[in-house]
């Protein structure tokens, strides 16, 4: 079997397992899995930029929040039908990513991180400033009646799980395909050695801008889906913490792998879930995991797997 | 009929904060020939090819490629026109496999044709003698092999002009011999601009030689002309030519 | 109150903010300048300084001044040692790689912050100022009787606030003397110029890095010790100073110490004045956005040199 077909099989296999899990898992854990899949979409979007292209953004929460608020505000206040509002949310994230990319990509390295952080902080403050509409930290709830597509109730556990799976599946396969294209391979080349990539005749700046927009779009999809499925929109999702989360997930799962983000979100979700049963200081786990990862496993869990057994892992 | 010169520079100059690295360099690169650019250390050779390839922005002057002014094109656009550049300090994708390194170089031209891409990569690797190391991680190669991979990445682009910045630096004597054979075989296929310190390589490969000294073009001509040129001898006086 | 006295009051508040900020930002700037790494956990060292001050003053007891003096010596020292230890244990082992250092310091941020939450708790705790005399301030005005000195109601400050400003200035002078006149400063500057050459000339670069990281954290902690009698100690208090210090360091030019001082005064004063007259959120939005734009279009900062 070629590496390529192995990898196809793995991606399909992951989706089959996720499908089957719904019928096996108790309701509570199935609910968790829906959340994990949506957050994994966010992590996958972040991974395209960080894991594949080597650009560390510390402000991705603004794209997630753009999707979330773009969707939430237009359904709640604008009364837009769900599909339109959803599309609007995603476009908001894409446009924001384009503008941020246009400015932030003029910088490199540490400056890029700080600039993205600052832009995200600005976005967060803007959400607070327009508290009349966004209800600030408190956030707002999207009514149950507004959360259905074509008669399918998205507030039921089943509707939620399979919508999450559908969206996750589409994004998962799209990204698996994307990173195998010449475009995807060029991104890896930029991560490895940008100057050399440029001197092979690739327009590295254009590639970076494109992938930032794509990454922003995926993050926006995740944000809009989150609001749609869980019915809540709040400024918490625009905080620095939500920019740090995808970094933790991706590092834990394995940066630059297609499966890494899902693994990372899964383990982190349950780590936090379990530890918050003992203490309010559950973010301590995040800190410890980050430090341990940088010290001992910079390539994450999937990176370890790839090194030891599954060398073909995409 | 195509012009004799594939590339020309007119009055190309670069100064770094008052230091003139290149002053008014007029240069012509003959199509299909191997031209060596020589000169003492600090003569401005790397700055010159940097300006030609677009890595370094010229302070003044023009670069003409096949008659068209490319002075204001960014580096990647110039490469797309058919310039290939190998770095003086080895610059490969250390984390990727040898074949992926070459594939990246070739893929810009062969993006839609996977079979042609595989064929190109295989033939280039065979040509430089790296076939049996195709799946190795490039960073694990020996220094000599990394230099050769760098050249393979240039070849894979099938460039119209191939700029080699000190390709034999740090190579063993036997590897230098292989390199000379390779360059000779390439002569006629493509135009080569070779920056070289090793005079044996220059004398055995170059059709034309250009000498740069203190940022100025000192002399241009055939190897015999250059050997006989008094100015060149003066410029090299005290510096070793047989290194 | 009239506009004039009001502005004076705002400027005084701004000066206090500047004084604290200059110390915090200086710490960040020195770390970046010498080690070329961004310490995201810097705000948490500040927070630790504040929390330790509360802890020390509450166990020392007696006159508040005794505890405060103990805190001003012990807290920065403890925080500095902790930071130097973290440098040894973590940063050294990732070779100060810029990306991995950022990730590691984000990790440290959460570890310090959440450990404090577990031990110190979520409450905000006040610390009593060692002295706190209310000082009324005069205002000069052309009135009906010509030039007159009046004492507008509400125009006052406290002796402690003036002390904070003076203390910060003293620390700065001391720091400047250390950097320019001592062997330690020489080692630091040599490392900053070119760590590899410095190493080749026998500078113990590894040790210098630990010292610098400790010093940076200690300065943040010192700023916090000075601030707790005005602002209460809380486990989340490190967030705003971190952002402000970032802003200052960027505006001042990454790694440029004089730039940092000037920017700290500028930002502190405008923060004080703007938040008196405008909506604080809007002010923050504009400030954050402008700083990002400065970094985009003038990455060397307003006063910095082109980065090497």
Image (cartoon, coloured by chain):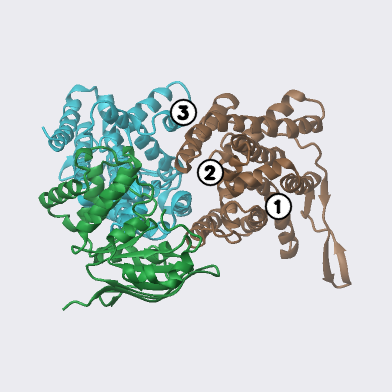
Q: How crowded is mark 3: few (under 14 residues within 10 Å), some or many (20 or more)?
A: some
Is circle 3 on the same chain as circle 2? no
Front tag of 2 and 1: 2
Residue B10 quadrant: bottom left
Is circle 1 on the same chain as circle 3? no
Tag of residue A288: 3
Q: Name the residue under label 2.
A: C37
The residue lying at 33 percent from left, 69 percent from top is: B224
Q: How crowded is mark 2: few (under 14 residues within 10 Å), some or many (20 or more)?
A: many
The residue lying at 56 percent from left, 54 percent from top is: C250
As drawn, B172 above or below A123: above
CB atoms at circles 2 and 1 under 8 Å apart?
Answer: no
The residue lying at 54 percent from left, 67 percent from top is: B17
Tag of residue C13: 1
- Give me the C-alpha separation between circle 1 and circle 3: 38 Å
Front tag of 1 and 3: 3
SS of the residue at dot 2?
loop
As drawn, A160 above or below B192: above
Chain given the colour cyan: A
Q: Where is residue B100 in the image (x, y as percent from the top left)?
A: 23, 45
Question: From this viewpoint, is residue A258 visible?
Answer: yes
Q: Where is residue C206 in the image (x, y as percent from the top left)?
A: 59, 35
- Give me the C-alpha separation between circle 2 and circle 1: 32 Å
Chain given the colour green: B
SS of the residue at dot 1?
helix
Front tag of 3 and 2: 2
What colour is chain C?
brown
Q: Which of A243 and C149 is in front in this view?
A: A243
């Amino acid at each position: 079997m070629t590496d390529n077909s192995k990898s196809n099989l793995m991606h399909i296999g992951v989706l089959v397992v996720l499908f089957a899990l719904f019928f096996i898992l108790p309701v509570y854990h199935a609910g968790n899995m829906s959340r994990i899949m949506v957050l994994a979409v966010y992590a996958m979007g972040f991974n395209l930029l960080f894991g594949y292209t080597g650009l560390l953004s510390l402000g991705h929460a603004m794209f997630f929040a753009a999707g979330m608020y773009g969707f939430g505000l237009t359904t709640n206040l604008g009364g837009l039908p769900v599909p339109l509002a959803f599309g609007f949310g995603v476009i908001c994230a894409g446009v924001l990513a384009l503008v941020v990319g246009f400015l932030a990509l003029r910088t490199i390295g540490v400056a890029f991180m700080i600039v993205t952080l600052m832009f995200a902080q600005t976005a967060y403050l803007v959400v607070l400033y327009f508290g009349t509409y966004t209800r600030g930290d408190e956030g707002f709830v999207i009514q149950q009646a507004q959360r259905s597509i074509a008669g399918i109730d998205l507030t039921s556990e089943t509707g939620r799980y399979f919508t999450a799976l559908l969206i996750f599946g589409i994004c998962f396969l799209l990204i698996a395909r994307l990173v195998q294209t010449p475009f995807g391979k060029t991104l890896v080349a930029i991560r490895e050695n940008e100057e050399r990539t440029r001197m092979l005749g690739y327009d590295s700046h254009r590639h970076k801008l494109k992938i930032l927009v794509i990454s922003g779009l995926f993050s926006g999809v995740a944000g809009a889906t989150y609001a749609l499925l869980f019915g809540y929109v709040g400024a918490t999702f625009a905080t620095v913490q939500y920019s740090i989360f995808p970094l933790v997930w991706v590092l834990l799962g394995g940066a630059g792998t297609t499966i890494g983000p899902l693994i990372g979100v899964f383990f982190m979700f349950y780590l936090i879930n379990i530890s918050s049963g003992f203490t309010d200081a559950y973010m301590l786990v995040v800190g410890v995991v980050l430090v341990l990862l940088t010290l001992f496993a910079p390539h994450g869990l999937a990176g370890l797997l790839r090194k030891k057994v599954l060398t073909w892992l995409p | 009929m195509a012009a004799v010169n594939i590339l020309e520079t007119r009055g190309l100059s670069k100064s770094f904060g008052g230091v003139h690295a290149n002053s008014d360099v007029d240069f012509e690169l003959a199509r299909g020939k191997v031209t060596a650019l020589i000169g003492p250390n600090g003569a401005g050779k790397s700055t010159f090819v940097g300006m030609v390839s677009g890595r370094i922005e010229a302070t003044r002057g023009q670069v003409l490629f096949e008659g068209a002014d490319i002075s204001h094109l960014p580096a990647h656009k110039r490469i797309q026109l058919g310039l290939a550049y190998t770095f003086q300090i080895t610059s490969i994708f250390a984390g990727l496999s040898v074949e992926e390194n070459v594939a990246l170089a070739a893929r810009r031209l062969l993006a839609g044709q996977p079979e042609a891409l595989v064929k190109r990569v295989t033939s280039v690797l065979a040509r430089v003698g790296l076939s049996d190391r195709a799946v190795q991680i490039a960073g694990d190669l020996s220094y000599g092999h990394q230099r050769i991979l760098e050249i393979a990445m240039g070849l894979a682009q099938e460039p119209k002009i191939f700029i080699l910045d000190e390709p034999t630096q740090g190579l063993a004597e036997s590897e230098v011999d292989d390199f000379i054979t390779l360059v000779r075989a390439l002569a006629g296929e493509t135009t080569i601009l070779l920056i070289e310190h090793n005079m044996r390589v220059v004398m055995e490969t170059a059709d034309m030689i250009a000498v740069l000294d203190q940022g100025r073009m000192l002399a241009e001509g055939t190897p015999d002309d250059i050997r006989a040129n008094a100015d060149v001898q003066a410029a090299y006086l005290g510096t070793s030519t047989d290194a | 109150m009239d506009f004039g006295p009001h502005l004076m009051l705002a400027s005084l508040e701004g000066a206090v903010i500047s004084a604290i900020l200059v110390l915090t930002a200086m710490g960040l700037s020195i770390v970046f300048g010498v080690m070329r790494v961004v310490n995201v956990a810097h705000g948490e060292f500040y927070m630790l300084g504040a929390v330790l001050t509360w802890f020390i003053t509450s166990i020392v007891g007696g006159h508040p001044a005794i505890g405060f003096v103990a805190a001003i010596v012990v807290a920065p020292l403890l925080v500095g040692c902790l930071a130097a230890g973290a440098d040894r244990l973590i940063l050294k082992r990732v070779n100060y790689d810029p990306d991995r250092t950022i990730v590691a310091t984000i990790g440290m941020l959460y570890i310090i912050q959440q450990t404090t939450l577990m031990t110190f708790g979520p409450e905000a705790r006040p610390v009593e100022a060692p002295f706190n005399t209310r000082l009324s301030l005069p205002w000069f005005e052309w009135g009906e009787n010509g030039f007159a000195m009046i004492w507008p109601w509400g125009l006052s400050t406290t002796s402690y606030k003036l002390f904070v400003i003076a203390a910060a200035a003293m620390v700065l002078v001391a720091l400047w003397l250390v950097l320019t006149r001592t062997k330690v400063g020489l080692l630091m500057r040599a490392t900053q110029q070119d760590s590899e050459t410095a190493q080749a000339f026998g500078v113990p670069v590894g040790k210098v890095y630990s010292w610098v990281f400790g010093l940076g954290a200690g300065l943040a902690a010192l700023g916090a010790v000075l601030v707790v009698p005005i602002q209460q100690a809380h486990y989340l208090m490190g967030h705003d100073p971190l952002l402000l210090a970032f802003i200052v360091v960027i505006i001042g030019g990454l790694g440029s110490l004089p730039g940092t001082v000037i920017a700290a005064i500028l930002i502190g004063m405008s923060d004080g004045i703007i938040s008196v007259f405008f909506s604080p959120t809007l002010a923050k939005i504009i400030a954050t956005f402008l700083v990002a734009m400065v970094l985009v279009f003038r990455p060397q900062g307003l006063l910095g040199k082109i980065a090497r």
